[in-house]
Amino acid sequence: MVSEVIKESKKIVIKIGSNTLSNEDGTINHEFLKELCHQVSQLTQEGKQVAIVTSGARIAGIGQINRWSRREDMNYKQALCAIGQVELMSAYGRHFHDYGLHVGQLLLTREDFFDKTRTLNIRNTLFTLVDEGVIPIINENDTVSVEEIKIGDNDTLAALSASLWNADLLILLSDIDGIYNKNPKEHRDAQLLEIVENIDDMINSIEIGETNSFGTGGITTKIEAARIVNRYGIPMILANGKKENIILNLLNNEYPATIFKDFQ
């Protein structure tokens, strides 16, 4: 089913998690980015339109200047994001350029999704970029976000963006293969749930555990992202971005993943 859904989807949002994007030392994993850009270029050659929601601005900032990693003051966190956003977009731009593709940046806050004028402007920008063959790179505007306007996690940002764009599919690339009935890091008999057609029933039948127990951001934000897009009839795939050529191999049914299709 995963392969068929990808093949049938024209408008695809791909979300990249921080762990997927970074090396162990906190720097940007350029090998991963190069591989991702190759896969996206293959999708565009097949007539698909792709938008990317990316994490990693703060870790890119730490990797760039090697300072403030332990500072918890909000102004330092936002400063790191300001520094890292430049490095992050530069990296995306360089690697996509190798495949003849240009990128455009959208930095958003929660308010942007609940203001009619801003929502219209986002939609117009997204449609213009993809119609002209440019890859939109979306991230939260962390340099100005405070609690009142902060989305909080890029799983939710990706779901809101996919819904706003009327996407056909959302793919979350994380550091896990999908949803298991229990934590696979603690239980050898954990089983992957390949298809979720009722999110509430799934939640009642699995052990979610503590935040981050299944990877960056926690499993809860990924489930809620699925709930958001499924409400609009958009399927969501959760897959392991650490696997080689994950998207193209999902197309060939070579890697496991979980697909959410709760369209009740």
Image (cartoon, grey):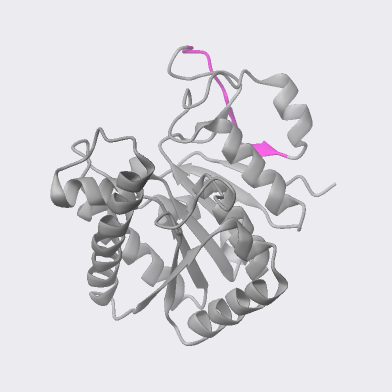
Instruction: Indicate left or right for 233 with 70 as reference.
Output: right
Magenta-colored span:
187-196
Which SS does the magenta portion mostly show? loop
Q: Which quadrant of the structure image shows residue 112?
A: bottom right
Magenta span contains residue 188: yes
Rendered residue at 62%/50% (across/down): 236
Furthest-right residue in this view: 264
* Position above or below: 46 against 164: below
Residue 119 percent across, percent down from the top left: 65, 71
Furthest-left residue in this view: 66
Q: Can residue 3 be seen in this view?
A: no
Instruction: Indicate left or right for 170 with 243 as reference.
Output: right
* Position above or below: 219 against 185: below
Rendered residue at 47%/20% (across/down): 184
Query: Is 27 or 114 nearer to us in this picture?
Result: 114
Residue 180 percent across, percent down from the top left: 57, 26
Rendered residue at 37%/71% (across/down): 41
Q: Is residue 126 visible?
A: yes
Q: Which quadrant of the structure image shows residue 122?
A: bottom right
Q: Which quadrant of the structure image shows residue 144?
A: bottom left
